[in-house]
Amino acid sequence: MTKKLILGFLGLFFAIDAFAQTLCVTNLRCEYRVNPIGITAASPHFSWEITSTGFNVVQKAYHILVADDPALLQKGIGNIWDSQTVNSNSTIQVPYAGPALVSTKKYYWRVSVIDYKEHSLVWSSIAQWQMGLLNTADWKGASWIAYEVMPDSLKILPGIATPGTKKHSPGTDVLPILRKSFKVSKPVKNATIFISGLGHFEMNLNGAKVGNHFLDGGWVNYQKEAEYVSFDLTELLKKGENALGIMLGNGFYFTPSGRYRKLTVAYGYPKMICRLLVQYQDGTTENIVSNTSWRTTAGPITFSSTYGGEDYDATKEQSGWDKPGFNDAAWKNAIIVDGPPQINAQTTEPIKVTDVFTAKKITQPKPGVWVYDMGQNSSGIPQITVKGKKGDTIKIVPCELLDNDGLATQKNTGVPGKNGYGHWYTYILKGNGIETWQPRFCFYGFRYLQVTGGVPPTGANPDKEPQLLAVKGLHTRNSADRVGEFSCSSDLFNKTNTLIDWAIQSNMASVLMDCPHREKLGWLEEDHLMGNSLQYNYNLATLFKKIINDMREAQTADGLIPEIAPEFTVFGDGFRDSPEWGSSSVLLPWYVYQWYGDKQVLADSYDMMQRYMAYLDKQSKNHILTQGLGDWYDLGPKHPGVSQLTSQGVTATSIYYYDLVTLSNIATLLNQPADVERYAKLAEQVKIAFNNQFFNKETKQYDTGSQTANAIAVYMKLVEPQYKAAVVDNIVKELRSHNNSLTAGDIGYRYLLKVLDDEGQSDVIFDMNSRTNVPGYGFQLAKGATALTESWQALSGVSNNHFMLGHIMEWFYAGLAGIRPADNDVAYKHIVIRPQPVGDVTSAKGSYHSMYGTIISDWKKAGTDFYLTVTIPPNTTATVYLPVAETSHVTMNNEPIENHIGANNSLAFHVGSGVYRFRAAK
């Protein structure tokens, strides 16, 4: 679509004084979070939103106050920092610029803004943040403590240990519990605990779990770092004796033997470190830290593996172990052990239980075996409520699919063979009434739960087995806020959107996983290829930044970014060095900047990017790269895997070129002129080599003429302008000649969709994806999938919960609903609303809560009329395209408007913030 002259703010035609309307400053965030604890940035960044019922609301200036007492802010005093009035329309990524911040201290802040008419607004409400631990001394002598120490001879570290018996059989370990009793003798003003447990921990205070997190802390490269979590205990402490109780699990810190393991690591046995800071109202402080005064013993969890499941023996519980007054004389003192050299604050949103599923159907495929169908394939854990005798044992096998006999099968999630199980849970009853249990330190991807050892209340029970009073599925995921919603008149597209969303949710943890069962690894290509789809749905700024740090920590001495981060195992062949995967080290920071306006992430990642480009330069031959997996899982004649239809050199070299162009743009932003020229020059050399190697000027085809080869060349702007139309035409011809069937895979499909969208061919996208009889989304739904599968064909032998092929979700929002940022825009400061009605779709609605506020595009067709309702948040502008003829009669908010510009069968309007209701009639 070409855009001619865009007219001035149509919203100004309305005689509405924006500031006579309801207006306020809301959603104050520090480092992306509301009232966070554990901030370690030397200069935290503030963001806020403006809400109003008026039109064309634009901030002219802001004023921030920071104090160490909220009462001072009420008086208009910022005793820590007073920004004074700053003439700027910035409402995002505004840096703190006051004196150095103090470790563990709590700060309060508020902001007011001034509009373009210089009307002062009311102040925002008061927000706060608390600093974390800024250096090693801030741990106040806390030590890593454990039940036992792993000898160096048993450790298995990625890339260091050699294969052998030890590697394949690391044994099992004791899963300990630890406790510490302490007294509170004075009124408490504030109490904060900073705690890390490896691989994961669960913390109780006075007999109750603290918080609602699951699998704290996040998994990282444990050879270099660990993550600590901060909790506010102010309201939980009581006068007199208190007790902390900690349970530890293995996670990725140690993968014990005995069951399925995708990989084997043994950094050490479980351990923890903590500092509890108690600040009393009289101004004194006290620190309770981890040391040898803590008591420890083996806990009731007898086996725990991120890959193999978890066993719990309730007969081994010690009542009151986490409460004051418990007699721990039979326990032993904790020992001091080594830990990772760096302990960083966990800044991502925690994993939590976000949904609870009950069985839609219960079957008994054979005597003694009960299968609970939760109706939804998702990541999570089982929860059982049972009643039985002491020593009775319940076994639970989770699975995505059932075999022909209706029994659980895990052959597609890591365990070959009929009824071979590698991940399961057992619970041994204590026998004192109704008992409820769920795993604490592992999870799986499942739709079905196969249960033995118990009987549902409605089942015959001649052997007096335990009663299964309830069996539930608890869905667990990173608790990032949902920021987007999409729906349309196409039932198939709505189901496709849900299908992809469940795969996204199921693979959001402390990394973006490939699958929630077989591997649980952070394969990096998904981060940039599915990034747009992800950010339309969830606020993943903190998770993306954590993943970027994982890449920095995983980068090798020679500059390689491996395909997984953290790199818990070193894969061989093409599974470690694929540029399409490693390029997330360049593209993801760039996209985070574009989505959230975060320039700091570019500066922090610049060295990593440069080192990776130097690595690729050395690997190239005449500027061509050929290593890696290529268009992974494309749809060819063989079982999916390494690219079948497109040469690896096409995707590897084209993304190398895209990296160089992107890095040149980043260098411009970071004021590195020499690098701008250097990377631009190298990019041009790669472009020439690429076209010489892969482009056929006679046929106007790249490589094999595959969907991926042609589309990626167009999207990356590798095609010379005089050939672009012909190459795009070849893409469409190839699709039409194959009855609109897709063949592109993990790498290529996103670029195929983007090119068709950009070139006005969304009708082809509709034709590809509005069917159920060929491999694709509809095909998967027709086969009963409830989450996006790993293969287009929904093969039963591979994962049935993968989000890597979900690229169409981006088109749902940006194409069908029509919400996208303007070219060269940052954080949706200027928005493009360009809905694309196609096929038999008669309506669509998309909403996205950007850094500035909620954007909505809601359209429908009724007869010959087209209706579009648009919401544009304050402090932003938008260009709105109506997909109607230039001769259409248009009204906006019931007022006729004749001033518009036509462009490729559409009309364009420029508006400020507000709600606009367009109607176009012939």
Image (cartoon, helix red, strand yellow):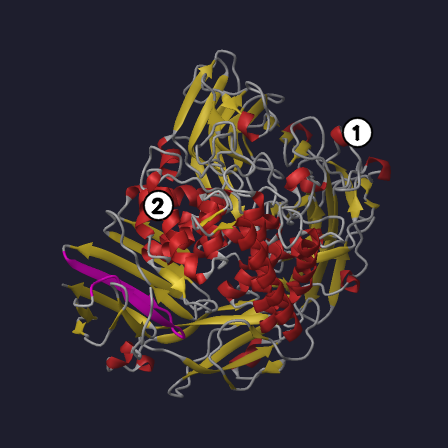
Viewer-side residue, 666 vs 738: 738
Q: Where is residue 636 in the image (x, y as percent from the top left)?
A: 47, 34
| Drawn side of residue 434 relative to residue 917, left or right | right
Q: Residue 912: which quarter of the image? A: bottom left
Q: What element carries label 1?
A: loop
Q: Residue at x 59, y 23 (%)?
A: 416
Q: Against 466, is 109 above or below? A: below
Query: The C terminus is located in which quarter?
Result: bottom left
Residue furthest to the bottom in view is 118
| Drawn side of residue 95 relative to residue 180, left or right | left
Query: The N terminus is located in which quarter?
Result: bottom left
Which marked residue is nearer to the observer: mark 2 or mark 1?
A: 2
Distance from label 2 to label 1 (Cα)? 53 Å
Q: Residue at x 65, y 49 (%)?
A: 217
Residue 321 visible: no
Viewer-side residue, 311 vs 816: 816
Residue at label 1?
A: 164
Q: Is mark 2 on a helix, strand or loop?
A: helix
Which mark sits nearer the N-terminus, 2 or 1? 1
Q: Residue 537: which quarter of the image? A: bottom left
Q: Is residue 871 magenta?
A: yes
Q: What residue type is labelled 2?
A: Lys
Overall secondary structure of the magenta stretch? strand
Q: How crowded is mark 1: few (under 14 residues within 10 Å), some or many (20 or more)?
A: few
| Drawn side of residue 311 relative to residue 271, left or right | left
Q: Against 61, is 142 above or below? A: above
Q: Give, as a single range, the part of the protein colored magenta.
A: 864-885
Residue at label 2?
A: 733
Q: Residues within 10 Å of mark 2 (few under 14, many from 20)?
A: few
